[in-house]
Image: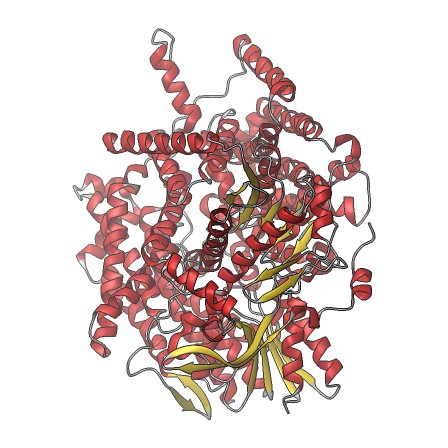
């Protein structure tokens, strides 16, 4: 009995930490609709700041708690500043731009933290007065855990007061319900949003600062916490603070008891729960169903078939690419092979997001499935290269068919979150099923057959697959399938009324996108000779999103430009110190300067250079 | 804002221009070697390592280089990703025309480059990755490894653990290849020495995501006599804190892999656990003159004390200088010939790359942790030469795939 209670309390203490981070994320999302990837970075900043401040203040109870509050306040101000200077410019852009912008912030904050605090892990002091353990039913329970168990509900109560008993809270809730009406009533939303960001970041900073007595402060804190925070927010219901608490308790206890009975699958457990909740109750335990009108779409021009000039240009480009090995140096081919693989991957994601209107936060899963499929066929089944290359993507197809069937039943950010959960489940499976996948040791020796071993041959093969895949995707876009898909995206009701089975079209699009991503993965495995779980982890999915958005969400050429720009840029600047900071700044500049991506920027440039041409809005 | 954007753009452009200018300014009389490591993914370990090899590089070049040429290191960051590491390796062998590749930290990145080296027939000297597979099950004639592997360090600890009275053992290790290997090898070695021990509990927290309180309680519940710990970095700090709060380590022996390395021990400060049996690097207490000279030079150059990574980095550079010196030419085949049983002098004595399995005989220190004057230290330590914990050359060759 004592043991059971002790484990329960341990779970509750972790739940409180988790709740503080997730609550801020949930509040920010609920009001501003920003999926804030940088929230984990604010958590990390809170911990670093508290570490530094606690060293400056006099030791003792006041010093410690003063440092925690001060650190949280500073993080809140940093968050408000970032919202004011940067994110507020992006509210009118598609939601994904905000995601990419916050991802850029993650990169920047990483390097800034490295620069300020150095690389070594820092261990802060324990909380004065709470540095021991008490015996409860014979089991030792740390005093600080008990304090955390109290702090969680206290913060929950305080936020409830703030939202339901203050004028500010009334306005914020009104903004959540109907932004336009609130604006019409003369409320300055700019200020409201900035203050919401302040509160959300404050909570993240508080969560980080409160970790000081529990763990060492390190540069890995940001990404470690963000996935779990997303899980909690989704399970609880986006925008619901009590929901976040409930979900945090659920996950905290699941971890506490999971390690007793299922110590080897604690990685996948939270994501399984998240997937189950999303399937049964997409808006989360205490959330509300999403109403229309939140997603701000840019007015989009209908797709037009390429004219003769464009066709000629495309053909010329293709010929140029095909001739590249005749005059380019060897490494250019290696780099261009990477670019073409990335382009096919990004094009498949764009097909799903741009044409299908379905955002995926887990597209790398299908890239990885295709790669693992090909690698397993080549090594375990000892198939020759061509059958392995062709067979691999079927694993991606199967995965996309399975997960897509569940995902297309949801819309908007809930769909995106379910794709994330699906990707994490696949990732955990690949990571932990060592007998088959080799775990994180990966699968080695997936080299091309002798006839295709040279860099030129790999290059031409990749060109064939990538160009063929992209051409097929474009063909789909201009086929009736593509039109049905776009109809379903732009107006699901009207599309349904004329007899289009929108969900079915979306499911097909999901499968197609997954399969083509798998094709990119299969050739990737052969071009690198090996495959590892990293290729289907969250950062790779984010890379895909960055490519699509850099290129332009609503242009078929966008993914090509975006993938090229991303791979070349990364390869180029990763030679410099603090290259993540530079990459982050470059992404921010592009996101704010050209919200319709490089393709849109080129189009506007073209319009400027050729003003007499008719330009449709 | 516009000004800011233009300004940033200009800065970026200038930076790019500057680096490409630097890159093109090639000295004719240098030997280029290509180094790849996870500098941004885990700077806490790779930065001291870089400082180590830079020190050795400066010393070697100041003394005239090898065969009259200076060594030039092209060093790149793989961000902890095997795919990126392969691309960089491709660039190094095609564009930069390096004569050999070396480096890497993570086992999976190391394995990827190992496989690449075999495919492209280039020499690769893996410096830090610990995976046994690197030289055994996935080994090949192009790859050598410097650091003592998981197998060797686990065997060193099992030897010490066998002398303890403890019979009931529990293990805790991060749930990935390095953790599972380290536990499997320890179990095997300890059971061989002590058939009477039983393993009553194992915990597999996700790497860098340990729920330390729950894990400590789960271990406590099994009531073992002793614990074998493989967690490191931030996980270790959390585990130590939560474990000592809950009295997990009271009256129990703890045997802990790598925890004596300054990278992992120093951040714990005065809270470092006392009396744990660990492998590590007590640089402050090694009195050998050659080693003391290394420590002094390192402190002089970088104004900080060395870490385990510093020594690994320093020794890597010495190994590279040695192979370049001894090889008849810079062709891969000649380098490979020179690598066979290559012996070089290091601050910690002679190190040999065994021809049989391509593993070096660099060892590690085994001792107990203690807090001396508020600083965590290793005491009662001894140097365990790597060669003593390796299978015989004949057995080692059987562990490797036929070529």
Residue B144 image point, x, y percent: 68, 54
**Which color scheme is applied?**
secondary structure
Q: How many marks?
A: 0
Q: Nearer the viewer, residue A351 or A284?
A: A351
In this image, B186 relative to A292: left or right? right
Image coords of residue B46 (percent x, y): 49, 56
- Can the viewer see residue B290 in this picture? yes
Q: Does residue B90 lie above or below B269 as drawn? A: above
Which part of the image, by quadrant, shows the C terminus of chain A? top left
- Which one is in front, A547 or A63? A63
Q: Determine if residue A394 is in view.
A: no
Q: Is residue B221 above or below residue A581?
A: below
Residue A145 in the image: above or below residue B262: below
Q: Relative to the observer, which residue lies in front, B330 or A438?
A: B330
x then y, percent, for residue B15:
37, 34
Q: Residue at x 47, y 29 (%)?
A: B24
Q: For this rendering, which residue is in front, B300 or A541?
A: B300
Percent position (x, y) of residue A450?
79, 34
Q: Is residue A29 left or right of residue A414?
A: left
């Amino acid at each position: 009995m004592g043991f059971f209670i002790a484990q329960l309390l341990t779970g509750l203490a972790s739940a409180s930490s988790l709740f503080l981070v997730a609550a801020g994320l949930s509040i920010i999302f609920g009001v501003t609709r920003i999926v804030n990837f940088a929230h984990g970075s604010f958590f990390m900043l809170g911990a670093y700041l508290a570490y530094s401040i606690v060293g400056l203040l006099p030791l003792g109870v006041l010093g410690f708690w003063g440092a925690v509050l001060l650190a949280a306040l500073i993080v809140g101000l940093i968050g408000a500043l970032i919202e004011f200077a940067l994110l507020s410019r992006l509210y009118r852009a598609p939601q994904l731009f905000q995601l990419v912008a916050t991802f850029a912030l993650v990169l920047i904050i990483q390097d800034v933290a490295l620069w300020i605090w150095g690389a070594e892990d820092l261990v802060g002091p324990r909380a004065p007065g709470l540095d021991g353990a008490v015996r409860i039913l014979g089991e030792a329970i740390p005093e600080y855990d008990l304090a955390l168990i109290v702090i969680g509900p206290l913060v929950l109560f305080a936020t409830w007061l703030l939202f339901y008993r203050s004028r500010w809270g009334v306005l914020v809730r009104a903004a959540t319900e109907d932004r336009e009406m609130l604006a019409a009533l003369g409320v300055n939303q700019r200020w409201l949003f900035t203050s919401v960001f302040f509160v959300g970041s404050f909570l993240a900073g508080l969560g980080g600062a409160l970790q000081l007595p529990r763990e060492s402060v390190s540069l890995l804190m940001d990404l470690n916490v963000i996935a779990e925070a997303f899980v909690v927010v989704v399970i609880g219901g986006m925008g619901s603070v009590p929901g976040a608490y409930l979900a945090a308790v659920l996950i905290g206890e699941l971890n506490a008891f999971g390690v007793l009975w299922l110590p080897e699958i604690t990685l996948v457990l939270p994501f399984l729960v998240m997937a189950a909740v999303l399937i049964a109750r997409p808006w989360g335990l205490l959330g509300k169903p999403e109403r229309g009108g939140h997603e701000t779409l840019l007015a989009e021009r209908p797709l037009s078939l390429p004219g003769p000039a464009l066709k000629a240009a495309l053909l010329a480009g293709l010929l140029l690419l095909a001739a590249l090995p005749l005059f380019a140096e060897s490494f250019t081919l290696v780099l261009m092979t990477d670019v073409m693989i990335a382009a096919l991957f990004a094009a498949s994601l764009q097909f799903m997001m741009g044409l299908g209107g379905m955002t995926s936060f887990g597209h790398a899963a299908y890239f990885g499935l295709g790669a693992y499929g090909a690698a397993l066929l080549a090594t375990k089944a000892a198939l020759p290269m061509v059958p392995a290359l062709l067979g691999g993507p079927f694993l991606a197809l199967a995965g996309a068919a399975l997960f897509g069937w569940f995902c297309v039943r949801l819309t908007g950010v809930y769909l995106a979150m379910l794709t994330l959960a699906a990707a994490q489940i696949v990732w955990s499976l690949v990571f932990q099923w060592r007998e088959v996948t080799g775990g994180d040791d990966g699968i080695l020796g997936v080299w091309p057959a002798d006839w295709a071993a040279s860099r030129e041959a790999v290059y031409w093969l990749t060109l064939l697959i990538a160009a063929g895949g992209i051409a097929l995707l474009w063909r789909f876009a201009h086929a009736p399938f593509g039109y049905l898909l776009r109809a379903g995206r732009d107006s699901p009701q009207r599309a349904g009324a004329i007899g289009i089975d929108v969900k079915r079209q979306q499911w097909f699009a999901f499968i197609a996108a997954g399969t083509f991503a798998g094709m990119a993965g299969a050739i990737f495995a052969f071009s690198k000779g090996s495959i590892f779980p990293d290729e289907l982890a969250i950062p790779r999915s984010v890379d895909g999103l960055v490519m699509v958005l850099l290129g332009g969400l609503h242009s078929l050429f966008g993914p090509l430009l975006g993938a090229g720009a991303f791979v070349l840029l990364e390869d180029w600047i990763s030679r410099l110190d603090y290259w993540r900071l530079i990459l982050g700044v470059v992404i921010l500049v592009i996101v704010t300067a050209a919200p319709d991506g490089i393709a849109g920027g080129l189009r506007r440039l073209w319009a400027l250079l050729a003003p007499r041409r008719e330009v449709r809005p | 804002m516009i000004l800011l954007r233009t300004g940033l753009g200009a800065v970026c452009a200038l930076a790019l221009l500057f680096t490409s200018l630097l890159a093109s300014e090639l000295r004719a009389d240098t030997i280029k070697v290509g180094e790849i490591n996870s500098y941004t993914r885990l700077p806490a370990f790779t930065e001291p390592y870089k400082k180590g090899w830079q020190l050795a590089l400066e010393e070697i070049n100041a003394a005239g280089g090898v065969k009259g040429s200076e060594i030039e290191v092209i060093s790149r960051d793989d961000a902890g990703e095997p795919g990126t590491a392969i691309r960089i390796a491709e660039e190094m062998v095609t564009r930069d025309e390096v004569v050999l590749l070396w480096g890497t930290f993570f086992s999976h990145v190391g394995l990827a480059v190992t496989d690449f080296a075999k495919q492209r027939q280039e020499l690769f000297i893996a410096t830090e990755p610990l995976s046994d597979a690197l030289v055994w099950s996935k080994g090949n004639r192009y790859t050598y490894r410097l650091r003592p592997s998981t197998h060797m360090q686990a065997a060193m600890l099992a030897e010490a653990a066998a002398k303890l009275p403890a019979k009931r053992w529990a293990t805790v290790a991060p749930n990935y290849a390095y953790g599972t290997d380290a536990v499997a090898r320890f179990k095997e070695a300890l059971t061989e020495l002590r058939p009477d021990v039983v393993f009553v509990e194992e915990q597999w927290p996700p790497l860098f995501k340990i729920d330390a309180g729950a894990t400590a309680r789960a271990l406590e519940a099994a009531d073992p006599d002793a614990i074998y710990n493989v967690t490191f970095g931030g996980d270790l700090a959390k585990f130590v804190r939560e474990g000592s709060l809950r009295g997990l380590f009271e009256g129990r022996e703890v045997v802990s892999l790598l925890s004596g390395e300054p990278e992992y021990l120093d951040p714990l400060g005065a809270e470092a656990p006392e009396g744990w049996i660990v492998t590590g690097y007590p640089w402050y207490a090694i009195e050998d003159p050659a080693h003391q000279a290394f420590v002094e030079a390192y402190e002089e150059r970088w104004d900080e004390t060395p870490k385990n990574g510093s020594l690994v980095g320093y020794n890597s550079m010495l190994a590279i200088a040695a192979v370049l010196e001894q090889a008849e030419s810079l062709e891969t085949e000649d380098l490979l010939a020179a690598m066979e049983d290559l012996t070089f002098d290091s601050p910690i004595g002679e190190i040999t790359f065994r021809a049989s399995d391509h593993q070096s005989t660099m060892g590690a220190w085994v001792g107990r942790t203690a807090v001396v004057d508020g600083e965590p230290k290793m005491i009662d330590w001894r140097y365990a030469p790597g060669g003593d914990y390796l299978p015989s050359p004949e057995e080692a060759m059987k562990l490797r795939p036929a070529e």
